Image (cartoon, rainbow, N blue to C red):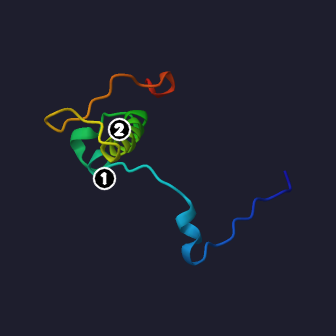
Amino acid sequence: MGDRLVFDYYYGKEAEQFTFYRIPKMLIKDDHFANLSDAAKILYGLMLDRMSLSIKNGWMNRIGRISFTRLKASWQI
């Protein structure tokens, strides 16, 4: 119990070594989404991430929509 974790500061571009999921602020701040679980909000961020990858690879239908046909079982809530 006596061991303490020590976190050093990040300098310059060191902070850019991490990748992040984007979750729209409105999902957190807007009262309309107050009853939505945190897990659902995180799942939305994961799906946005997958969507950007699909866009990058050109995986969309003829009218520009991207759909998810399968979700990994670990993503299901």
The Cα atoms of the two marked residues, 1 and 2, are separated by 12 Å
Q: How many marks?
A: 2
Query: Where, quadrant-wise, is the C terminus in this rendering?
Result: top left
Mark 1 highlights which residue?
25
Q: Earlier in the sequence, mark 1 or mark 2?
A: 1
Dot 2: element: helix
Q: Is residue 45 left or right of residue 61?
A: right
Q: Is residue 22 left or right of residue 65?
A: right
Residue 22 image offset from top left, x and y in percent? 38, 51
Residue 45 image offset from top left, x and y in percent? 38, 43
- Looking at the picture, does residue 13 appear above or below residue 42? below
**Residue occupying the point 34% across, 46% down:** 52
Q: Residue furthest bottom?
A: 12
What's under tag 1, amino acid-wise? Lys
Camera-side residue: 64 or 30? 64
Mark 2 highlights which residue?
44
Dot 1: element: loop
What's under tag 2, amino acid-wise? Tyr
Q: Residue furthest right?
A: 2
Residue 7 image offset from top left, x and y in percent? 69, 65
Residue 50 tag number: none
**Image quarter for residue 68?**
top left
